[in-house]
Amino acid sequence: MQPRSLRDPERLLFELSRPGRRGVALPPLDVPAPDRAALDPRYTRDEVEGFPELSETEVVRHYTRLSRLNYAIDLGLYPLGSCTMKYNPKIHEKVARLPGFAGAHPQLPAGAAQGCLRLMHDLERALCSICGMDRFTLQPAAGAHGELAGIMMVRAYHRERGNPRQVVLIPDSAHGTNPASAHIAGYRVEQLPSNERGCVDLGALRRRMSEDIALLMLTNPNTLGVFEGEIQEIASVIHARGGLLYMDGANLNAFVGRARPGDMGVDLHHLNLHKTFSTPHGGGGPGAGPVGVMRSLEPYLPVPTVEKEGEVYVLRHERPKSIGKVRSFFGNFGMFVRAYAYILALGPDGLRRMSETAVLNANYLRRKLESTYHLPYDAPSLHEVVFSDRHLEDTGVHTLDIAKRLMDYGFHPPTIYFPLIVKGAMMIEPTESESREELDAFILAMRRIAEEAREDPDLVRTAPHTTPVRRLDEVGAARNPVIRWTSPQKPR
Amino acid sequence: MGDGHRYIPASDADRDAMLREIGVARIDDLFASIPAPLRLKGPLSLSPAMSEQELWAEMSRRARDDRQPDPGAQFLGGGAYRHYSPAVVDHLVSRTEFYSSYTPYQPEGSQGTLQAIFEYQTLICQLTELEISNASLYDGASALAEAVLMAERTTHGGRVVVSDRVHPEYLEVCRTYLANLDLPITTFGHRDDGSSDPEAARRALREGKASAVVVQQPNFFGCLEEIEAFAAAAREAKAQLIVAVAEPISLGLLKGPGRQGADVVVGEGHSFGVPLSYGGPYLGFIAARQSFLRNMPGRIVGETRDVDGRRGYVLTLSTREQHIRREKATSNICTNEGLCALMASIFLAVVGKNGLRDLAAHNHAKSAYARNRIAAAKGCSLPYTAPTFNEFTVRLPVPADKAVRTLLDRGMVPGIPLSRYFPGMDRDLLVCVTETNPRAEIDRLADELGRLD
């Protein structure tokens, strides 16, 4: 046996397991012991083969050690563009665990769940005020799920008007979820080119617009962090031929309290509670993707809706034109509690200050880094800025290397190689959560990396050097996929 | 404006200094790209900001509003199940390194999340007795919809055949997902004992091609299904068998559906330590045979090596996914339900092989006890005779929704009136008993139901 070192990998649960250990004790069974014969053995098994056997102590150490291998927003700047990695207030975790919320069964009669229904009702009203929309559904479990629900509503809307239409138009700078969602909703996707400012090419839209187009999906501000300044004209072109305008609200953090989608000609949009409204990203979910609609789309909202009748909150299932349900029950309620707490904590002034500071921070980074890194589009930035690796082309150092090297400086890298319209893109979104000192430390790291690329490019190309593992073989992982542990005694 | 907000570090002085560095005079100048007619003139119509103390008081008041009976006196299942979650689960998922990180796009800085997901995938494979699992989906119902879409991608049957004993919300979500895809759903019936009828499935399959047969284990009415019979029917018709599991604690006692011939097993994983939380966030799981690997929806984590040969984990097989394939992706899913999958893994790790078997046995025993007690109660009967796990259907002498109202006034929720989903089943009540219902409450439930007449 080798002595232990701090860089030892953490073994898997299954490798730590030892027969006969247990991590829980159940209370004594307070009813007669089960009659073995009560359940035919053709239904049953004696044990789950390979399942771990560990004490509570070992389980706690295992996961505590694993946690230390992660970077997190509470450790510092996490500038993933379009992901809005902002601080998650600790009071949210406390209120979401209140027994009246966390312990509420979704099958409770509505009369015994008034607190939960009231919260959903009030969150919907608050989102309507913030976004200028008439109604929201809270049901979708994530942004992409909201897109899907939204496009299904659009289809139901057009179908009722005699023709569901065939095509959804999507700008070439859009997130991949947009075309994937449109496809599942039964639409053909056509890409719309960007103009030299990275925005929708209004002329191209005018030429393409026809009665077979159901919808344009527009991210605003777009994935370059640029406000689509011609959005009203875009909406007019679409509406003139009976089409609808969807706004991907992933980047709503850019203008809360400054502008509202409902005032821009947008017919419907989703937003991500885990972005703008600060619910934790959880290592990749759970999110929540409410969809706001104008009155014309209200009949198609998923069921049930929450309505207030006098002083009583009810769930309304009888909605004949509804698209149905996109998940069980009412959505990711625990995220609604956190998002509502965030809105109450910030209030109208705080929400406005949130977006103002997010935009301020992004512009500060832009100003301090634009002489070091190539800025492919110089249109004004809102909440995020996109650079590229072009200035370092002659060094052989690429965006991926810069991202990996940032980890050695103690930062999570930005979103890289997205949007697709920028070669070698680095999409940086600092959010309002960062102090000037934290931004300055990031700026220093980015400048230092650019110097290293010229002086010692191999140092950058072989980064990271200080992380728990170094650069991983992703190609090999995909070529020979091993996606579960198997007992070494048994061939895979 | 005052000097900032507690969540936002920049003070007014910081803002001014940064504006000067940027080279603009006012914050408004940073928003000049928003056309003037679109700029909001006044403040948002919301209540003013609250201190943390006020917020805590307000949210506590809202959570207290409820007339929720004592949890031990609630006999609710129907897709969500109350189980005791060991303290370590909440403690460990509250570690900020887990909950305030994101999708592990940069594996070198995310090994904790990645290894935990790799372990989750293994646990799901072991439970279902299948070969592969993804990193989780939104919930059980949408997982079933994704499984049906996967079956169609691989089999091109153009139709799915679904038992009428599947959770009605799962079925409704499938209908919503399939509505625009020219992929009709044919439902088939059940036997008198409450279990789905394999012969009815065969008849439905003979009506034309189909890509999948779907049953739920245990089914929505609590009855156990004979999975092998549906596997045989599916095989004969060259369709896949998808088994949905809404209450996965049952897998501590029941055979893994994969061993019984299921090609794909999906389900709802929240029973593994994730709070009820009025219906979400939960997590969907999906496991399948190896041959589905490149057709799976959602994130998948794989094992690999770093440049020094050390074992590590990465997101893999991403050429299936939307950020690479766009409209040709296997699904539009971007994130999974990471933190819920982590909760489920920690729950399963600490409950372990022995604990899960015992927990399932306790659920079964207490539910069997309740079933016998209620069957003997005056005016009550059991419409179905098929074996059950922790949930069963009771026929009452009065309409079930009326019984629920009556017992709610006595601090008890006896179950779910099935008329909520099936008009006509007025007197049927779906009762669920878990380890969280003490014997005294089960006895009181039987006594109260016996007094309804």
Image: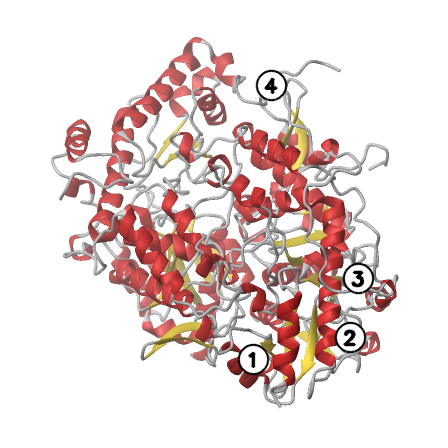
* Residue, disc 3: A33
Q: Secondary structure at mark 2?
A: loop
Q: Nearer the viewer, mark 4 or mark 3?
A: 3
Residue at the location (46% across, 9% down)?
A: A456
Q: Pinpoint the chain carrying mark 1.
A: B
> Which corner quadrant of the image does residue B218 belong to?
bottom right
Work out how far the residue at label 4 is from the one at label 3, CA to CA, in angstroms.
49 Å
Q: Secondary structure at mark 4?
A: loop
Which residue is at the front of the view, A45 or B354? B354
Q: Pinpoint the chain carrying mark 2.
A: B
* Residue, disc 1: B420
* Residue, disc 4: A7
Using the rendered image of the protein, determine whether residue A273 is visible from the camera's viewpoint. no
Dot label at residue B130:
none
Work out how far the residue at label 4 is from the one at label 2, CA to CA, in angstroms.
54 Å
Which residue is at the front of the view, A291 or B80? B80
Callouts 2 and 3 on one subunit: no
User: The C terminus of chain A lies in which quarter of the figure?
Assistant: top right
Q: Is residue A463 left or right of residue B418?
A: left
Which residue is at the front of the view, B406 or B133? B406
Question: Mark 1, residues whose alpha carbon is within 10 Å: few (<14), some, or many (≥20)?
Answer: few
Q: Are marks 4 and 3 in contact (CB under 8 Å)?
A: no
Q: Where does the image place residue A480, in percent across and percent down from the top left? A: 73, 34
Q: Nearer the viewer, mark 1 or mark 3?
A: 3
Q: Spot the residue most to the left.
A: B25
Q: Secondary structure at mark 1?
A: helix
Question: Mark 4, residues whose alpha carbon is within 10 Å: few (<14), some, or many (≥20)?
Answer: few
Dot label at residue B195:
2
> Which corner quadrant of the image does residue A474 belong to?
top right
> Which corner quadrant of the image does residue B25 belong to?
top left
